[in-house]
Amino acid sequence: MKKKDQNIAVRQSADDLIIQAPVAISFLKSNSLVIESANSHILELWEKQADIIGRPLAFVLSAPGQLHYVKSVQDVYKSGHIHFGYETPIRLNRNGHNNLFYFDFVYKPVKDSSNNTVGVMVVATEVTKQVVARQLLEEAEERLRLAIEATGIANWDMDLLNNDVIASSRLSEIFGYDSDETLTYQQLFGAVHPDDKCVVDMAFEEAIKSSIYLCETRIVWADGSIRWIRTTGKVLYDDHHKPLRMLGTTIDITKRKQEEIMKNDFIAMASHELKTPLTSLKAYTQLLVSKAKKAGDEFFINALEKSENQINKMARLIYGFLDMSKIESGKLQLNTQAFDINELFDEIIADKLLIAPDHVLSFKSGQTIQINADKEKIAQVIGNFISNAVKYSPKGSAITLAVKKLSENLRISVKDEGIGLKVRDQQSVFQRFYRVEDESTRGLSGFGIGLYLSAEIIRLHHGKIAVESEEGKGAEFYFLLPLQTDPN
Ligand code: ADP
């Protein structure tokens, strides 16, 4: 092929490349920037037709809003330096709508063999999707930031490898500093009330295992005043499950906490005052029962036994409230001793007629299993499971108690054939005052504190409490007690 023919072929393939390119391209020649070639994408940007090819750029893009664009290309020709333009907004008519679109531009000088600029190559890539996505993200972030600010919640990010903390300014305020002061991990942890440091340590240990950090503690401000804070966090791990970071929020709960303390004190005082008259009421009723029995008066025996039952119910409730206030003020203590769990079950079963007169209560005593625990409190938890099983299952149905020795734990369970629980309620029933309110529980009274107390007692024993259930098919409440450790 002759040299001239070769040039034509090269030129042709360069033109084809420009026309078929997925980005907007134009080649502008000589210092008058004559449009040598332009593909359909760049014609769309300029809002022109192919008949502009062969005409100077300044002549084609002469509208006032286009002059700065022409000038940028002229500057590249004159200086011989490449120019980049990022996320340039351009209004375009597309699909009958006039909208703003965004483009990244490159104006590249094209040089001959003597390094003289002979033209400019313009390439534009559309980045509208990326820009819009980023703008939406920025708006969402801003909305979230405003919402967080309005709630008074501080958020933070802690590097678990070197304890560096990045926090919102609200955290400094919660800890009694100016909002522009940056706090270190040492300052934050150092502010925790000395009596609550172990609570923080325990919550942290738990977070490393379960990924969830949750803690309510007191902090001491520099002026000596005491505040309450609630902190929640989530641990992030690397591929080898090594903890890397913890993200979380902190909120000042001093208002709420003071009200809670006042409410607790009131409950504790009222329950305490009710205990004494109730004890003498019980003693007198028992006396009357035995007198009625001696006299063989069936009506009185029946009526007084019913009264005694109601008194026992009331006593359980009052002791429950007392325990709850002890838990809230951190004063519920264990009185541990070594005992055989089967003995405890035998004692419970001996009261069968009293605790579940209308159910088929069964327990098979197995091997001797010694545990170290608070016998009275463990009995309280099992008693609560049984009275719930009685309450939430039909008369005549079976209630099965079981003890199983696992490798590290003892599993104690109470299973019924009652109404069961929805999956969404299975976690929540261990929270204070939580009750399932639906058709199946209508008419069944309660305060929703029994399982909360049980959960706290098991937590103090370093055990685990849970329920397995299918709605309508009964429930199995159980707890695990570590076999080795002494809770104290
Ligand atoms: P209370 O029974 O006084 O409401 P609890 O704390 O003992 O309080 O129980 C909390 C809730 O858990 C109950 O209101 C009930 O909805 C549910 N629950 C407890 N035990 C059972 C059970 N055996 N079967 C079905 N639901 C139960």
Image (cartoon, rainbow, N blue to C red):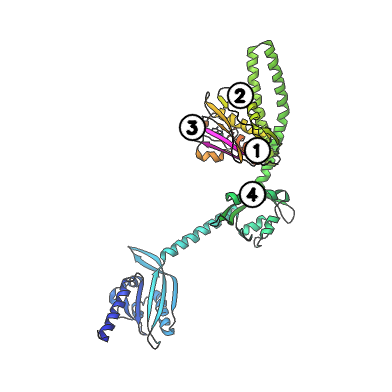
Relative depth, front residue between 327 and 61: 327
Q: Where residue 352 is drawn, which disc sits there?
A: 2
Q: Is residue 294 visible?
A: yes
Q: Is mark 1 within 8 Å of ligand 1?
A: no
Please name whichever residue, 271 or 209, is drawn nearer the observer in this view of the structure: 209
Left/right placement of residue 452 relative to residue 488 reads left
The residue labelled by disc 4 is: 203
Report the magenta residues as a range.
462-488
The image shows residue 44 at horizontal and vertical percentages of: 33, 70
Q: Earlier in the sequence, mark 3 or mark 1?
A: 1
- The residue under label 3 is 473
Residue at the farthest right position = 224
The residue carrying pointer 3 sits among few (fewer than 14), some (14 to 19) or many (20 or more) residues within 10 Å by Cα, namely few
For numbered disc 1, what is the local secondary structure? Answer: helix
**Precedes in sequence: disc 3 or disc 2:** 2
Which residue is pictured at 48% across the width and 32% down the height?
A: 473
Measure the C-alpha gap from mark 4 to mark 3: 36 Å
User: Is label 2 in a helix, a strand or a loop?
Assistant: helix
Q: Earlier in the sequence, mark 1 or mark 2?
A: 2
Type of the residue with mark 4: Ala
Quadrant position of residue 79 = bottom left
User: In the rendered structure, which disc, 4 or 1, sits on the residue that comes first in sequence?
Assistant: 4
Residue 370 circle label: none
Q: What element carries label 4?
A: helix
Question: Which of disc 3 and disc 4 is earlier in sequence?
Answer: 4
